[in-house]
Image (cartoon, coloured by chain):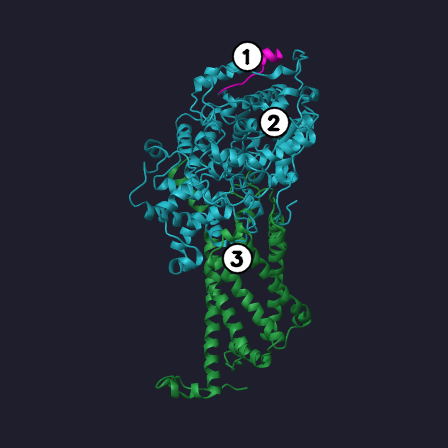
Chain colours: A green, B cyan
Amino acid sequence: MPFERYSLDAFRGDPKKHPLIERGWERRQVITIIFALLFYSATAILLLGLAVRIRTYAKTPAPLKIPTTPAPTSKGGVVLRLLREVVLFKSLFKANKWIWLFGWVFHFALLIVLLRHLRYFTEPVWFWVAMMQDLAVYAGFAMVAGLIGLWVRRMVVPRVRYISAPSDHLMLVLIIGIGVSGLVMKYIMHTDIIALKAFFLGLMYFDWQPLPEDPVLLIHLGLVALLMIIFPFSKLLHAPGIFFSPTLNQVDNPREKRHLAEWAARLEASEGGGG
Amino acid sequence: MTELEKTGDLSVDDFLDPLERPELAPDIMAESAPFVAAPEIQEKLGYPGELVDNWQEKAIEKMGELAGKYRSFKVYLDSCVKCGACTDKCHYFLGSGDPKNMPVARQDLLRKVYRRNFTLAGKYLPWLVGAEDLTKDVLDDWYSYFHQCSQCRRCSVFCPYGIDTAEISMAAREIMDSVGKGQKYCNEIIGKVHDVGNNLGLNPKALKATLEDLEEDLEDETGLKIRLPLDEKGADIMLVTPSADFFAEPHIDGLLGYAKVFHQVGASWTISSYASEAGNFGLFIGSYENMREVSLRIRKAAQDLGVKRIIFGECGHAWRVAYSFLNTLAGPFDFLDQRYPVPQHICEYTHDLIEKGEIKFDKSKNDHIRLTYHDSCNVARASRMGDKPGGQFEIPRAILRAACNHFYDMAEDTIKEATFCCGGGGGLLTDDLMDIRKKGAQPRMRALKQVAEDHGVTHMAAICAICKTQFSKVMPDYGFDMDSIVSIHQMVSNAIILDGAKSDDEDEAVNVTVNEDAMPAADGAEA
C-alpha cells in the first residue's frame, strides 16, 4: 500500500476549494499526516519528559536514611519490597480493600491490554502476544470496570471527593475514554485493523501509510496521544516515582554503613566537626 | 483487619472502634496553631526574627532549594495520585474530622503551591490541577496544619508509593522558619540544647544534684549503692537519655531501671552533662543543620569522656535520629568499640542480658499490673532494634514479658507498624496545642479501652518520653490514673533481682518522691 506523495503547497489558497477537502481520499491524507505527527511528538514528549524526570529524581540526593520500617536489611530485600509494591500493591492492600481491588484490576488489565497492542507494532506478531489475545479481551472490560470503580469512589466517598481536583476526575475520564473507544471498535464498530497496523509500522520505519478514518479509531488514538503527552507532567509520574521513593527503596543499615549525601559532605567540610 | 469501606450507621459495638472514620468537619481545626517564636529565639537558630517582607518569594525559593536537596520531597510532591488510601490513617483526622488532617490533604496545602510555581500545568492551568498561589491564608493554613502532624509516619505505611507526610511537614516547617515564622516550642528548646545541652535547660550542677538525690532514693529502696554517674571519664558506656528522664514522672522510674540494670551486671557507665539530651528537635523542624549540631554534642561528649559505647534511653524520635541519622550526622564513630552497634538502645542492651541470663526478674513484683504496650511511632516506623526487621516490636515486648506476668497486646491494627502516635509527638507536646493533642490521642485511647475491657488491662508501657508525658495528660480523661502510663524500664526496675538487695515484701517499693521544687513545669520539659 504505497503512500501517495503530495505537496504542502496544496494547503495554500482557498481552503474550501482545496482538493484535499473536496476529495475524501485526500482528507484521509491530512488525517494521516496529523496523526503521524501527533504520535511522533507524543512519543518524543513521553520519552524525553520521562527521561528528564527520571534523571532529576536520580540526581536529587536523599541525605538521610528514611526507610519506613520494618524495612529490608539488604539490597535483595529492597528489590523484593519494591516488587511486592509494584506487582501486588501490598501497602494499598493494607490500606483499603476497595481501592486496592479497583486499582489493581485496572493496572494489571492495562498491562495485558498494552501487551496485546504489541500486535500492531510487530510483524510477525510475537507468539506470546498472539497467545494472550483471548485473555486480553476480558482485560479490556476489567480495565474499564476498575476505572469506573475508582471514579465512583472519587465521587461518592466524601474523603476522596474532598481531595480531588478537576484533573483527578479528567484523568479517569481520559483513560475510560481510551478503554471504551477500544472496546467499541472491538465489538461494535470495527475498524480496518490491517490498515491501522500498516500505519503504525509505517511510522516506525518512516514509510508513512494511510490511517483509516473511522471516528472511533481517531478518538481512541487521539486520547492515547493526549495521555502520552501529559504523562510526564502529571501525577502519572507515580510510575517512575515509586522506584525513587526513599521510604521504600532504602536499605535499613544506617548503623552499619555511613550514608552521606554530597551536599552534606560539603557542609561537613565547611563547618568542621563530624568525621 | 482493614475492613471494606464502612457506610452504615454506628452500632454500640462500633463505639470504641479506634479506626472509626469521623464525619468530615471542614476547617474545624483551622484555629489550632502553636505560639509563634519570638525574634530572639528565631535568630539564635539562624532564622529571620519575624516574617520577612518578601516572604512569598523567599518561601518559593526555599521550596525549590529543598526539592533539589531532598529526593523524598521532590518525588512525593510529584507522585501522589490522590487515591485516598491515606485519608483515614492519621490519628489527628480520626480524632478531629478536619479533612485537612487527612495526610494527602495536609500535603496538598504545600503541593498546590509547588504545582503553581514548579509545574507546567500549575503555571498555565492552575484551576485544572488545584494549584494555588502562596497567599497569607495559605501560609496560615500551613502554620496550623503542619503543626497538627506529629511526623509519625503512619500514613507512609499505607501509601502505595510510601509517601511520608512527615517529609512534607518537616519541609514546610523549614520553609516557614526560613521566612521568619517559626514555632516557639520547638525552636526555644533547640536553643536551650545549643546553650546548655538539654531540652530543659538544666545546667550540670542541677543535674548532678538531681542524680545524687536519686542515688539516695535508690539506696533507701534497695540498700545498695546504685550509682547514677555523671561525667565520669573513662567509663565504658555513655548513656544518652531524654532529659525528661531526670525530672518527669513516670520517666524517672525508667532511669532508675537503667541504673539497676547497669548495677546488676557491674557495667561501667556515665551520663554526660554536655550531651544530657537524647531528644533532637532539629528533626521536627526539618533542619539538617540544627539536627547535626545537636548530634555533634553527643560525638564530642563521647570523645571527651573516652567512652567505648553509646547507649540511648527510652525516647521515640530520639531513637530515630540516633539509629537512622547519628552515623550520618556525626559519624563515623570509628573511635568506639566496633563490637557493639553504634548507637545501641537500652532495650537492646537489657534484652541481651536477659537472653544471656545475666539479669533475672521476680515477675510477681509486677502482679498488681496488667499491662499493654504502646509502640511509640518513631521507634516503630523509623528505626529498628536488634538484627532483624521488626526487632523494634519484639524486643520491648520480650522485656515486658520477662518482667511481668500479665501482658496483653491491643488490637493488631493499632500496634506495631500500624501503631498510632500518642498525639503529642513531632513538636506538638505543648499546652498551646492541647486541643489537637487530646483529639490525636483518641484512637490510641479507644484501643486501650478495648484491651482494658477485654483483659482487665490497668497500665500501658511506652518507650518514648513524649508518649509518657502525653499519656499522663490524656489517660485521666479516659478513666485511667495518671500513673497508668509506665516506662519499659520501670517494669524492669520493679522486678529485677538485685544481688544483695534488702528483701522487701511491699509492692509499693518503687515510688520515688521527687522534690517538687526541682520539677520544671511539665510541658515543654519533655523531649
Spot occupied by residue A213 in the image (x, y as percentages of width and height): 52, 80
Up-down relation of residue A186 to residue A139 (above or below): below
Q: Chain of mark 3?
A: A
Given the image, on which type of amino acid does mark 2 rest? Ile
Spot occupied by residue B434 in the image (x, y as percentages of width and height): 47, 32
Q: Residues within 10 Å of mark 1 (few under 14, many from 20)?
A: some
From the viewer's perspective, tell me whether residue A70 is left or right of residue B134. Answer: right
Up-down relation of residue B6 to residue A187 (above or below): above
Numbered tag placed on residue B488 in the rendering: 2
Name the element at disc 3: helix
Asked if the residue under mark 3 is in contact with the one under mark 1, i.e. CB atoms within 8 Å, the reply is no
Q: Are marks 1 and 3 on the same chain?
A: no
Given the image, on which type of amino acid does mark 1 rest? Glu
Q: Which residues are magenta?
A: B215-230
Name the element at disc 2: helix
Name the element at disc 1: helix
Spot occupied by residue A139 in the image (x, y as percentages of width and height): 64, 66
The tag earlier along the polypeptide, 1 or 2, is: 1
Q: How many marks?
A: 3
Foreground pick, B475 / B404: B475
Q: Is residue B67 visible?
A: yes
Spot occupied by residue B87 in the image (x, y as percentages of width and height): 54, 47
Numbered tag placed on residue B409 in the rendering: none
* Residue bearing mark 1: B216
Q: Does B224 appear in magenta?
A: yes
Foreground pick, B328 / A189: A189
Q: Quadrant of residue B183?
A: top left
Given the image, on which type of amino acid does mark 3 rest? Pro
* Residue bearing mark 3: A240
Q: Quadrant of residue A254?
A: top right
Q: Residues within 10 Å of mark 2 (few under 14, many from 20)?
A: many
